[in-house]
Image: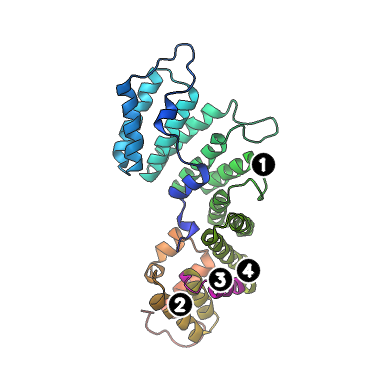
Amino acid sequence: HFLLAEAILPRGAEAAAGAPKKPEALITGPVGEGVIAPTEEQTEVIRRAFKAFDDKRLEEADRLFTEGINTWITLKRPRDEMGELYKTRGNVRVDLKRFPEAKEDYDRVISLMSSDGERPDGTAAYMEYPDAFVQRGLANEGLGDWESAVNDYSRAIGLWGGGRGEGINPYTLTFRANALGRLGRYSESVSDYEAAEALFLKERDLKRAVDSRANRALSLYETGAVKEAVKAYREIIRRSPGYADMRIALAAHLWANGEQGEAESQWEFACNNISVGCKKYKDEYWVSSVRRWPPTMAANLRSFLGKTGKQGAPTAAPP
């Protein structure tokens, strides 16, 4: 199943911020004084850049976008065209995990839009402006700058009208919740995951709704609301028996609380009866840094894998 905590980069960003414009949209914009129309050969470079990105030929896409951007600067092309090119190159660089360069591109986009991107009431004048903050937030996550990521996501949410209800993109709420968790602000992340779940349900995106519910349960556990969190683990398992993440979370909790028999049962079911299995959960780095389980649950899982629960002597590690 899809785990939202793994969707930081970059495909989830496209869902939050929309797909880039087609190259034709970049060459038919308004032409002002001193603006030079591109030649067919120059336009073809842009087309090839988008095609390379679509085909995931990322190094080639980066090179072509850079060539196109330099040409567009020389031609004094309109600001919206420049913004779209910088943003799309930033997306390429995120995919390449070249986060400092990606952030520089998003900084340029935001600077280009800042003069007219916001209405007097604080909402966005056009959708590309908050989108740029979402994309920069993802780049900040890649840099490990969680505070800046939260600030960028909050800025986008504010431009959409603020709060956690209608009009807010649930992916961005999830991104912010993930980053809040990295800062140890789990109570706030609980609220974002809960709101994201409600919005995904309204969109009839049941898989993402369940992912949000699972992430909320893990965050609840870290706040100390253990009873409520475990109840949520069990409810998710009841409704989605193949949701391995929650079975393994429940196993880790049960082992830490001396309920070894059921802990083993939940683990074995996840390992042997669910297609995704349990292999990744034996990798401490993956659990903590990719899946992003909170510290207490990650420690419980380490205890389970090492077989050092409350009752009995250590035994062999799970298969």
Can you identify the residue that label 3 sits on?
236
Sequence-earlier tag: 2 or 1 = 1
Sequence-earlier tag: 2 or 4 = 4
Q: CA distance from mark 4 to mark 1?
A: 32 Å
Residue at 50% in and 84% down: 262
In this view, the residue in front, 222 or 74, is 74
Amino acid type, callout 3: Ile
Residue 213 position, x and y percent, is: 58, 63
Tell me the element at label 1.
Answer: loop
Can you identify the residue that label 2 sits on?
304
Amino acid type, callout 1: Gly
In this view, the residue in front, 59 or 81, is 81
Amino acid type, callout 4: Gly
Residue 80 visible? The answer is yes
Q: Are marks 4 and 1 in contact (CB under 8 Å)?
A: no
Can you identify the residue that label 4 sits on?
224
Sequence-earlier tag: 1 or 3 = 1
Q: Quadrant of the C terminus?
A: bottom left
Residue 77 colored in magenta in the image: no
Amino acid type, callout 2: Phe
Can you identify the residue that label 1 sits on?
161
Eyeballing the image, is 13 above or below 84?
A: below
Sequence-earlier tag: 3 or 2 = 3
Q: Nearer the viewer, mark 2 or mark 1?
A: 1
- Point out the residue furthest to the top here: 33
Which residues lie in the magenta part? 229-244
Tell me the element at label 2.
Answer: helix
Tell me the element at label 3.
Answer: helix
Q: Nearer the viewer, mark 4 or mark 3?
A: 3
Q: CA distance from mark 1 to mark 3?
A: 31 Å
